[in-house]
Image (tube, rainbow, N blue to C red):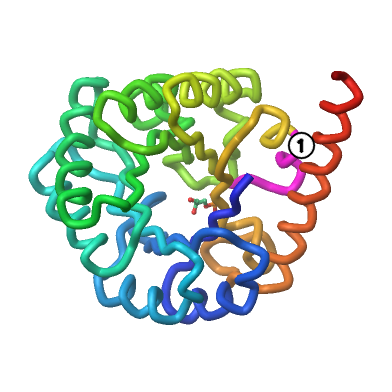
Amino acid sequence: MLLLISPDGVEEALDCAKAAQHLDIVDVKKPDEGSLGANFPWVIREIREAVPADKPVSATVGDVPYKPGTVAQAALGAVVSGATYIKVGLYGCTTPEQAIDVMRGVVRAVKDHRPDAFVVASGYADAHRVGCVNPLALPDIARRSGSDAAMLDTAVKDGTRLFDHLPPETCEEFVRRAHETGLLAALAGSVRVEDLGALTRIGTDIVGVRGAVCEGGDRNVGRIRPHLVAAFRAEMDRHAAQHTVAVTTAG
Ligand SMILES: O=C[C@H](O)COP(=O)(O)O
């Protein structure tokens, strides 16, 4: 499982860089603009320069409206600024068709500029609270739009967590649907270390966190700390090793 960490700006990205050996992807966002709030292009550029070259930089394009042209242009801005993982939160899409429309534009805008960039279609585990597309539709939306991964986060950051809205069995079905069509499955949403066992067991490819690696577990007031990133990674590795033993023993 890959670890994606979301700093809110250059200062926190520098702290992520200090823990670079413990993480896999640095994800630029602006949490005060929403769950997948988009940051400024110059922030993406500065973070790309600050993070070791072998660590991909991801950027969120926002909790986007159903405006395919606007979103495609924003996604191009993110990739031109140096991000190679482009994450789109399909907040304003109420049907799979709308979501596919948005993601097709993003895929074209991004891949015309940089064919090796990785496009992530993100929905929300708590979609029922904000009226957007069903989370289990995301793998099919990602597949039909030519995206590379399907992701779920939570739309409302009120302390409730991924598994409060979608139990592990439903997340497992999400992962299964993504894998069935050759896509990666990414999961996030106030994930804590105690969720890592289930996330590992169900085959999650990427786990996205912010709060869990901030001081006091607080994604707004706390700051990302390198030792918390290292500790989170150690727990991930422990669960991965346990899972391998369990699978080998069962086989
Ligand atoms: O993409 C990952 C998100 O930033 C997760 O943030 P969170 O762990 O604070 O919910």
Measuring 58% from the left and 72% from the top, which residue is drawn there? 223
Measuring 40% from the left and 64% from the top, which residue is drawn there? 28
- The residue to which callout 1 is attached is 197
Residue 160 among magenta residues: no
Nearest the viewer among 145 and 73 is: 145
| Horizontal side, residue 36 vs residue 106: left or right | right
**Above or below, comparing residue 224 to residue 167 in the picture:** below
> In which quadrant of the rendered image does the N terminus lie?
top right
The amino acid beneath tag 1 is Gly
> In which quadrant of the rendered image does the C terminus lie?
top right
| Magenta range | 190-197
Measuring 33% from the left and 45% from the top, which residue is drawn there? 119
| Horizontal side, residue 99 vs residue 229: left or right | left
Q: Main secondary structure of the magenta part?
A: helix
Measuring 70% from the left and 36% from the top, which residue is drawn there? 200
All told, the count of numbered labels is 1
